[in-house]
Image: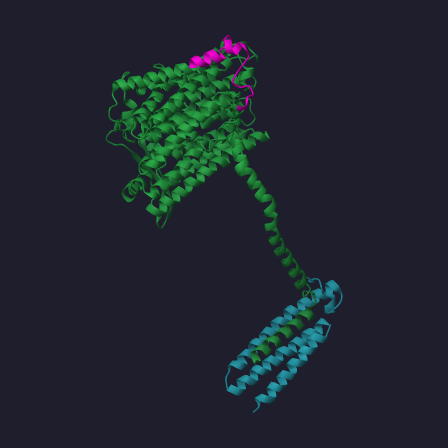
Chain colours: A green, B cyan
Amino acid sequence: MISLLWLIPALPLAGFLVLALFGGRFTRQQVAWVGCGSVGTAAFTTALVGWEFFQGFPDHESYHQTLWNWIDTSGLTVGVSWYLDALSLLMVAVITGIGFLIHLYSAEYMAGDEGYARFFAYMNLFVAAMLTLVLADNLLLLYLGWEGVGLCSYLLIGFWYREPEYGTAAQKAFIVTRIGDTAFAIGLFILFTQLKSLSIQQVQSLATEAWPVGSNLATIVAVLFLIGAVGKSAQLPLQVWLPDAMAGPTPVSALIHAATMVTAGVYLIARMHHLFALAPLVQEVIAVIGLATLLLAATSALVQQDIKRVLAYSTMSQIGYMFLALGVGAWSAALFHFLTHSCFKALLFLAAGSVIKSLHHEQNIFWMGGLRRHLPWTFWTFLIGAAAMSGIPLITSGFYSKDWILWSVWSSPLSHRWIWYGALLGAMLTGLYSFRLIFRVFFGEVRTQPTGEPGLAMRVPLVVLAFLALTVGFLEMPHTLGNVTLFSQYLSHALPTMELLPGMDESSETREQLAVTVSALLGIGLAAILFLPGSNFSRRGADLSTGRPLVTLLQSGWGFDRLYDRACVRPWFLLTRNPGELLDRGYEWLTVGAESCHRWMSHTQTGHVRWYAATVVVGTLVLLGLFAM
Amino acid sequence: MLSTPALVLAMMLFSLGLVGLLSRRNILYMLLSLEIMLNAASLAFIAGGARWGQVDGEIMFLFILTLAAAEVSVALGIVLQLSYRFHTLDVDAFSEMKG
């Protein structure tokens, strides 16, 4: 059964090929069957493979499958080969499982769209590329998947290509992530020239032997990989593409820009953890980047008016938590937050999609309100998602994962106390912006009349994801609450466990948990005071989203777009416009010279045979004269 | 030696042919001049062969003879086509290939 591993990426790829070649001739129902079916069977295959993997699990920690040699020249052999261990199995399960639910949802959500087959073709291609990324055994194949998901992200952000703005957003996402990808590629080159290998496992053991901790080469490669991860995962300073990427259809935002692709950076760092362990400085940078991004994104999410932009900033913020955990060496905690985040964020996006669809594609939360009674399914599932994101204690998965991260930040030898305070502030802001959304959209008076609840194909994924958003957290519970360690035990076979600082006992853990709980509840309470219709503050008609300078700054995501426009885009255009023409002048002279030579030489071609004969004679005489001399 | 007058004759024939080639406008006469030049070259080979007592010169003459036969058959075909198309044998009228 486990030898069916190759089928998992092959099935969505086959789905893509079928839809791309024959999609135009299929009926909508057939398209939906192919599109959902390929990912569904991939999820089923994952279940089979996972079952067999668990049968022999602690003894056989990894499974290796080589299909064929992709590149085979002297000194470089790259195989199309898959590597399954605890980490990649977790990723594959999330990608196929949640991917299938989102495909099912899209079958109804996209029903009225003319590009139905195109949509499913791109989505299937995305799933195939993402699976290639996480299952790849060598870095080159991983890079193929990495670029593949970037391409699909571009195609799907610009899915409605008739709107020029959406095309611009797609290009922006593509170009900004390309900066990271270039750094990643340079990192690959350095690794290969130094260690003569691209296999992920081999290269890391070689690096550990060859490079001492903190050596220059290890730091440079780790920094380059980090830039790649930062670009893909929309972290500071390459985060500007993600809010604009919301131009794509909502299921795309759920699948690519929340659950899977944007966490590829987290996967990359976790996969290369031996390398990052050689560069402690870079690890500290990861933690700081995570903290800065989570605070920046959380404050920006507070004042956005577009429901999807709020969720986009919240995604950046939650991935910031994952980076923070990676930075302090809590690898499993980062992956646990990845798992819970992909459940509740996919849920939030899908529920938001259901709101948007029922309001005729209205996305401004100021035109929403009072949807609680009209859309009860959407309301309850959205509420569960928001509760999980803000980390309501005990009952939601988000609490367990975020608490684990904060506890790791508190107790890790690699961390600092101020980082923990920043992360705690972030937890408070998360509660605030999540419940601002709830109170704005679902409470108060109805501003836009909704058309009604979505159908079954959209409701089933919502309910399943809501169930997961509540229960996934029970896989890992802290010592003080239940002491379940299923998840950390499972991942300890692929990732190292974190060492605690001395003097960390249960009472300090309880105090830390209380702080997390209080900050989350404080955020929600603050949201109720500020935004619940009927409260003092909101009766006065005020919101954080009115135009004061600070609010405008936050709304633009701390003005990074303008900064990059001034610092990079405009100077570049200036450079290409004026001195560019000066450079052109040289080439123009070259063409003018060539043209005049041509005109001069063509006079000799008279077309008269006698003239040619005469030139031959003269030429011969000249040559003879030269020899005679 | 016999070869010196033969070479002088060959040179004279060659110059005659060359002048004819350059001064004649009728394409048939130009072909005739060409044949004279070829024969002058052959004569030079023969003279050379006789001078050094080698058979190579005569072999070259046979080659040139074959070449001249082939050249004439192709050239006459072209001349026929030209006279069909342009109704004249004046080479200066055929300047379609002017660059």
| Vertical position of residue B72 compared to residue A262: above or below | below
Could you tell whether A17 is left or right of A589 in the image?
left
| Vertical position of residue A588 compared to residue A310: above or below | below
Could you tell whether A214 is left or right of B35 in the image?
left
Residue A615 in percent (x, y) is at 65, 71
| Vertical position of residue A516 compared to residue A613: above or below | above
Residue located 74% across and 64% down the image: B86
Choose between A474 and A499: the one closer to the eye. A499
Residue located 56% across and 38% down the image: A570
Residue A608 in percent (x, y) is at 70, 67
Residue A528 in percent (x, y) is at 46, 12
Residue A463 location, quadrant: top left
Choose between A34 and A580: the one closer to the eye. A580
Q: Which residues are magenta?
A: A524-549
Q: Total marks drawn?
A: 0
Q: Which quadrant, please, contains the N terminus of chain B? A: bottom right
* Residue situated furthest bottom in the rendering: B1
Residue located 39% across and 38% down the image: A225
Residue A532 in percent (x, y) is at 49, 11
Choose between A247 and B45: the one closer to the eye. A247
Residue A323 seen: yes
Residue A536 located within the stretch drawn in magenta: yes
Residue A45 seen: no
Q: Which quadrant, please, contains the C terminus of chain B? A: bottom right
Residue A495 located within the stretch drawn in magenta: no
Residue A294 location, quadrant: top left
Choose between B89 and A322: the one closer to the eye. A322
